Amino acid sequence: MAKRSAKGLIDRADATKVHLDGCNQSRGAAGDTRIDGDGLEGPTLAVRENELRCHELLLRLADRLPDQHLWRFRDWLAGDAADVIAQLLPGTLVRERIGLEDDEHRLLAEALLPLGADPAVVNAVLPAEPGTAPQHVFTTENPGNPVADSALLVLGATLRSRPGVREVRNSWRSTGGGAAKLVLLVTASADVVGLTGEIQRVLRALGEPEPRVEVLSPEQEPTAYHRAALAESALVCAGAEELAGRRG
């Protein structure tokens, strides 16, 4: 078990207190109505921004959080149940002994404390320990999975020329010498949260119980996990944005 320095513990506790104070102030002003440049009311904009924080957090955890948990958290997020994530994700990280880097822990606090996460549980999440993350190997080689083959055909037909989608790629991930599993990698400027949920539902309907769907915005810096997957990936289809770029 990694040992936190006294300073690290104090820093995390202070950060938690700051976020709690900010949450209380935000709740006190929740009745205020504000229109931003995009025509969204203040509370609506705040909800969308927090959903994107949660989405980014789950992207950051894709290399460590077991698939059985990850897809469920993403499904809850797409179903407007981010408060469920706030209640369950910190405890899952503690129980699974999944450590976070300092910037990831800040993101965890920023995303989940406003939604009612327990500050004590958030602060109990372990710091990341070098060499403890699962070792993933990616390849473009399809192992001949009939469920995945069907899924790729359906997704290609569904997302080809889709507005807001740049491209859809797939890779095969092996972890610890286990069986290769399909990973979908989507670059999109559309509703990344909703698109993740939509693709997961399609994959589950086609027989994939724990879909691995990584939807990144063009502006988002891929993690090492996503860079490795993209480096060993094959194109499934291009969306409308990619086709428009080629025509231009």
Image: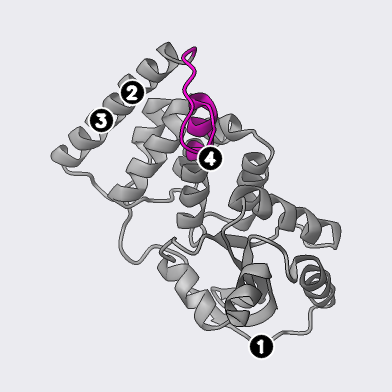
Whole-number angstrom distance, CA of label 1 to CA of label 3: 46 Å
Q: Which residue is mark 3?
A: 13
Q: Secondary structure at mark 1?
A: loop
Q: Which residue is mark 1?
A: 141
Q: Which one is in front, 206 or 238?
A: 238
Kind of residue sitting beneath label 1:
Glu
Mark 3 neighbour density, 10 Å: few (under 14) some (14–19) many (20 or more): some
Q: Which one is in front, 173 or 55?
A: 55
Q: Which circle's residue, 2 or 1, is located before the other in the chain?
A: 2
Q: Which circle's residue, 1 or 3, is located before the other in the chain?
A: 3
Q: Is residue 215 left or right of residue 132?
A: right
Kind of residue sitting beneath label 2:
Gly
Q: Which is closer to the viewer, label 3 or label 4?
A: 4
Kind of residue sitting beneath label 4:
Glu
Residue 105 drawn at (x, y percent)? 35, 44
Q: Is residue 208 left or right of residue 16?
A: right
Q: Which residue is mark 4?
A: 51
Q: Which circle's residue, 2 or 3, is located before the other in the chain?
A: 3
Q: Secondary structure at mark 2?
A: helix
Q: Which circle's residue, 2 or 4, is located before the other in the chain?
A: 2
Q: Which is closer to the viewer, label 2 or label 1?
A: 2
Q: Which mark is residue 22?
A: 2
Q: Which mark is residue 52?
A: none
Q: Secondary structure at mark 3?
A: helix
Residue 155 drawn at (x, y percent)? 78, 68
Q: Which residues fall within the magenta stretch?
A: 31-51
Q: Which circle's residue, 3 or 4, is located before the other in the chain?
A: 3
For image coordinates 42% across by 14% down, the residue present is 29
Is residue 237 visible in the rendered image? The answer is: yes
Q: Which one is in front, 133 or 109?
A: 109
